[in-house]
Structures are given as C-alpha cells and as structure tokens.
C-alpha cells in the first residue's frame, strides 16, 4: 500500500487537541484497509517521527434521514497515534 494513500486527513477536534497537548497523541482518518503496521510506516516516513503506540477504531456511519428517505453516512477508520516524547507533527502546530 502506498504510504501517501494510508493517511487521509488529520482529525482536529476538542478531544484530539487535549490528547495532543497532554499525552502526545495524534488522531488521523486512515484508509479502511490499512493495518497498524501500514499506519506506523506511513507516519514515520512522512512526518519523520518515532511512533510508540497505535490504536485503531472502525467508526460505523450514523443513520441519517431526509423526509421518508433513510440512509447512512459513510463508515471510516480512525487511528490514534502516540509519539515518542519530544516528537511532534508539524501539521498540527498552530491549529
């Protein structure tokens, strides 16, 4: 798997910002077929940091309804990445 197609976008929420500041954890939306090893290799090569731990979560899309038409939002995969102390990812700086 191409390392640039593994990570789709960073997740910037209130919860992820607190985790980044206090515990050096970063959240990303990743490809649904990516494994923890793929995610680790992609983060280490793209951002040039050392990854200590990875947690992944398959987020199920919520049900949505417009009038009588029911549907679902898309499902996606979230990765919470813990970096070594002293490391940081520049994408998040200033956010």
Image (spheres, rainbow, N blue to C red):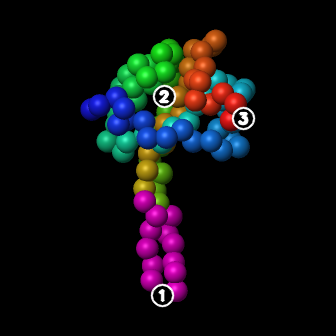
| First in sequence: mark 1 vs mark 2 | 2
**Disc number for residue 54:** 2
Q: Position of residue 3 (x, y in %)?
A: 34, 29
| First in sequence: mark 1 vs mark 3 | 3
- Is-magenta flag for residue 71? yes
Q: Position of residue 67 (x, y in %)?
A: 52, 86
Image quarter hosting the C terminus? top right
Q: CA distance from mark 3 to mark 2?
A: 17 Å
The residue positioned 62% from the left and 31% from the top of the image is 92
Q: Where does the magenta region start and end?
A: 62-74
- Is-magenta flag for residue 95? no
**Disc number for residue 68:** 1
Q: CA distance from mark 1 to mark 2?
A: 41 Å
Q: Quadrant of residue 19?
A: top right
Disc 3 on helix, strand or loop?
helix
Q: Which residue is mark 3?
A: 18
Q: Position of residue 52 (x, y in %)?
A: 51, 18
For the residues labelled 3 and 2, say whether their Cβ atoms are less than 8 Å apart: no
Question: Of tags 1 and 2, which is closer to the observer?
Answer: 1
């Amino acid at each position: 798997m191409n390392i640039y197609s593994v990570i789709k976008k960073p997740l910037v929420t209130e919860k992820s910002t607190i985790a980044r500041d206090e515990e050096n954890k970063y959240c990303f939306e990743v490809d649904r077929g990516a494994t923890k090893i793929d995610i680790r290799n992609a983060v280490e090569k793209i951002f040039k940091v050392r990854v200590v731990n990875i947690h992944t979560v398959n987020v199920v899309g919520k049900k949505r309804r417009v009038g009588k038409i029911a549907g679902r939002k898309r499902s996606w995969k979230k990765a919470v990445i813990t970096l070594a102390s002293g490391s940081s990812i520049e994408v998040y700086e200033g956010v």
